[in-house]
Amino acid sequence: MRAALARLAADSPVPIFVLAGQGAAGRVDGLRLDPRLRLVDSPRAASLLLVAGRLPRSWLRPALRIHAQMPHPRVTVWWPLGYAPRSLERRFAGVVRVAAQEDVAAVLVRLQQALLRRERASEPDLLPDVDPAPWRGVGPYGQGGKGMTGGVPFGRPLATRAADRDGLELDFLPIRVGPFFPPLPVGLVLELRSQGDLLQEARVVEPAPGRPLPGDVDPVFLRALAEPVPLAALERARARHHLRWLAGMLRFHGLHALAGRALALAEAALVGAAAVRALGRLLERTLALGWATRGVGIVPPEQLRGQPLGPVARAAGLAEDARSVDPAYRALGFTPVTHREGDAHARWRQRLAEAAQALELAERAGDRLLAGGEGVVEAPRGRLTAGGATASPLLELLPALLAGQEWGDAMATVVSLDLPPVEPVQGASGVAA
Amino acid sequence: MNAPLLADVLFWLFAAGSVLSAWRVFRADSMMRAAYWLFASFVGVAGIFLLLGAEFLGFILILMMAGEMTIMVVFMVMFMMNPAGLNPMTMVHQHRTSIAVGVLAFLGLAALALFADFPAAPVADTSRATAELGTELLGGSMLVFQTAGVTLLSTMIGAIALASVRGRYGDAEAGSTEPQIAPEGVGRGSHAMPAAKEEPEMDEHHGHLGHG
Amino acid sequence: MSPVTRAVLGVVGLGGSLAVLIYLAAVLDRVIGHRVAQQPLRWSAALALPAREAARLVLQQRSRTERSDAEAWALAPALLAAAAAASVAVIPFGPAAAVADVDAGLALYVAAIALVMVAVFLHGWSPNSVYPLIGAYRFVAVTLSFQVPLALVLLATALPAESLSVSAIVQAQDGLWNVVRQPLGLPIFLATGLGAAFWGPLALPDADDLAGGTRAEVSGVPLLLWRAAQLAVLVSIAAMSAAAFLGGWRGPWLPGVVWLGLKTLAVLVVLLLAGHLLARVRQESFVVFGWVVLIPLALVDVFLSGILLL
């Protein structure tokens, strides 16, 4: 009976939960299009944990907790992508490493089938199964409080009560949303306080304020800081970035099939601006995407003036674009696209328009080279300078933006801002500390 | 199994179920469970309605009670700090008074049930309960129901006005914290933060999705 | 045929047809999804996919969380499935044939939809976890907004039939289907029906912005049961719209059951397409929309059909 079920289940898409470390973002998106795999949102829906790239030390404990939540049969797979941290193999005993030229999807499918047929044992727990709260000696659950009020039964503080705007004392729940929460960029940890359906307060825990964020910038932009690069390559990279972000946004809003279409456009070797515009028209016609994003997360242009914030600023009406001063772009007749409203709706339309514009420029550019070497280039997320990345000013705006919003709207705002993944500060080598 | 026997068996099942779940309401630690045990009790009563031939009333009872019990749960979660019963607690107070009142009420109702002279008027098999209900609502009892209907409508309008977006201190979308009544920098600071007792614990122990 | 035999046959038939329709709904969902995504999918692969997924889920361990409400957690998928099955039971598949031909069939149907709300709330509350809890009470807020229009448009179809029994409603459509007489009815019913099955634009409890919402902590057989029960509710909505608006078993040449099945599948395709093409609504906007737009429109629908009757 079990063997029959295992045979039947052998060809089902493998559910994997991905921990995308450094250098992994683009490669993971490629996996989404593979029909043999299914990337899931919750570790409890997954059979395999795919650790891609390099995990900094501060993410190891959350990664272990995610591993603990995965139901059996499970296995951890590590996709090094050029990094060689040994601490991962130490902490994740029994992790399967993907060799350099292997097809990741094939490895995952093979492991899933071995797990189902019980040819491979499921991984045991890596964390000790102990009570998080020390015994406090008061009350049968050791909660330490007095009767009904307060205390921390099982180490989890109960919702307390706080006044809301009408003077009622309503429940007030602190929620920590942590490094691998799907709508948020990888590594961002928020501390939210929710009262009813509204978030009263938001606080950015990780990254610490002021820390630089290299982000996952396509290397062609980094090269453009120092030397002339082909304009077509730069613009195609820009379009690819925006289309990938669009796919992520569509997935967030529940449009998985359309996200697949956007991702296919992003991953295609040569895609024309016409296809992107067609997708844009389809999305415009989908009324509900307008409902879902209109008026959500309005960022007023005053807070964005002068900051190197790229599409977010341009969607609020500020026509700031480092490409306007570049002679190669001016020769092609480039003018920055802008929208007025500055809400999530304007931001996704902005990025879609910029992707189409980038592809058109790439088609017309031929072999033109960017003037380059000036130390300033317009990356997909904003202006990039040779001095290195600075802390994203959007993170400072985040608490004020999210306060008072409903959960769905708050997450939609974060998604629409296209924050870079929080990656560790580059050490001297790729070896995790 | 002939029909009267089946009806009797079902009646006793529903009745016993109602009484048992009503008892569980007061023994449950978790408020959610208490509310849904009450719902189960009402479902038993709705079953008895069905046996009496009042199908419409039975289904409507289930419909209304499902919504009402869920709203009760949401309100309890909103206002109480221990809605899941994770902390030890007791929701029953004034034991002696309530036992006395309960026994008295039981004796009174039992006396009524045993000694009152109920008419023997079995409902005909072909009666259309819904049509008769409708005729009664718009015929003999119209005044009663219209008055009750208008009262309910005004209550609903009042509730909607209370819950409106324009709250007491302004628009709800402009952030939901109470405005400061002390000037900034004197005394309280951020009002929305309660006197959180066990702050350090929050680091590792949140929710079950260890996303953080 | 004694009543007991009839009842048993009815239940077995109901379960079997519901299982077949659930499976077909899952297959259609995949096919439509791949079509919208412009990715190729062979029909043979599509037909086997739900079975493979189900087998994999059976082999997966069921998850436990700390201090969860274990009984309520186990009850939730069962309650959802029972509500869906009870609601399908009133739908007639022939001139005098329904598994439960109750006089107040519409009342039973709307009560079953209310039980869906209870089941989803239980499912979200029980794991003692944040994301399912948020999903659960979001759904409660939205459900209370769409239950009234759903009941009202169904009542409007009861007016020409002068009866709450679904068989009578189908009988009363012998001249003209209700979708033609009451044009507002079917769109409103489909919109609120998507909410009742928490599908597509109204997938608020199991949403992607909550890492799966009430499903986030579920795995293994309970997850399989939950997803199947959700599809059962969707099938029930499709079947009721076929019966109340599209003439149910009425149609030439083919037997009534087949017509009902075809109409149900057609409505299912529409619902699944809506799931793939419409983004998830904002909770607050939908609540406002429900009270300010849907309820007045449903009331207009009732008035119009009443006027037509007079």
Image (tube, rainbow, N blue to C red):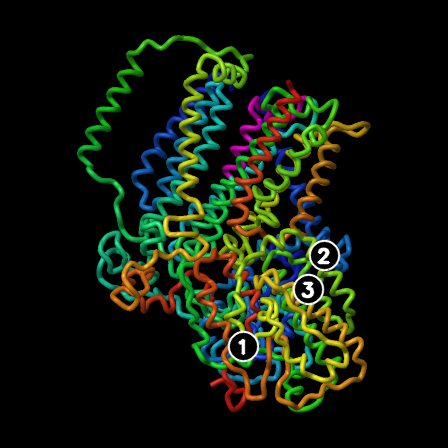
Read off the residue under disc 1.
Answer: A307
Determine whether, in the image, residue B201 is placed left or right of residue B143.
Answer: left
Determine whether, in the image, residue A288 is placed left or right of residue A143.
Answer: right
- Residue at (74% x, 63% y) in the render: A277
Magenta residues span C96-115
Amino acid on which disc 3 is placed: Arg
In the rendered image, which quarter contains the N terminus of chain C?
Answer: top right
Amino acid on which disc 2 is placed: Leu
Q: Which mark is residue A282?
A: 2
Q: Earlier in the sequence, mark 3 or mark 2?
A: 3
- Residue at (65% x, 51% y) in the render: A287
Q: Are marks 1 and 2 in contact (CB under 8 Å)?
A: no
Distance CA(mark 1)–CA(mark 2): 32 Å
Amino acid on which disc 1 is placed: Gln
Distance CA(mark 3)–CA(mark 2): 27 Å
Read off the residue under disc 3.
Answer: A36
Whole-percent x, y for residue B177 in the image:
37, 57
Q: Earlier in the sequence, mark 1 or mark 2?
A: 2
Instruction: Give above or below for A419 relative to A279.
Output: below
Is label 3 on the same chain as label 1? Answer: yes
- Residue at (52% x, 63% y) in the render: A43
Numbered disc 2: secondary structure = helix
| Quarter-of-image position of residue B38 | top left
Magenta-colored stretch includes residue C102: yes
Instruction: Give above or below for C146 relative to B207.
Output: above
| Quarter-of-image position of residue A352 | bottom right
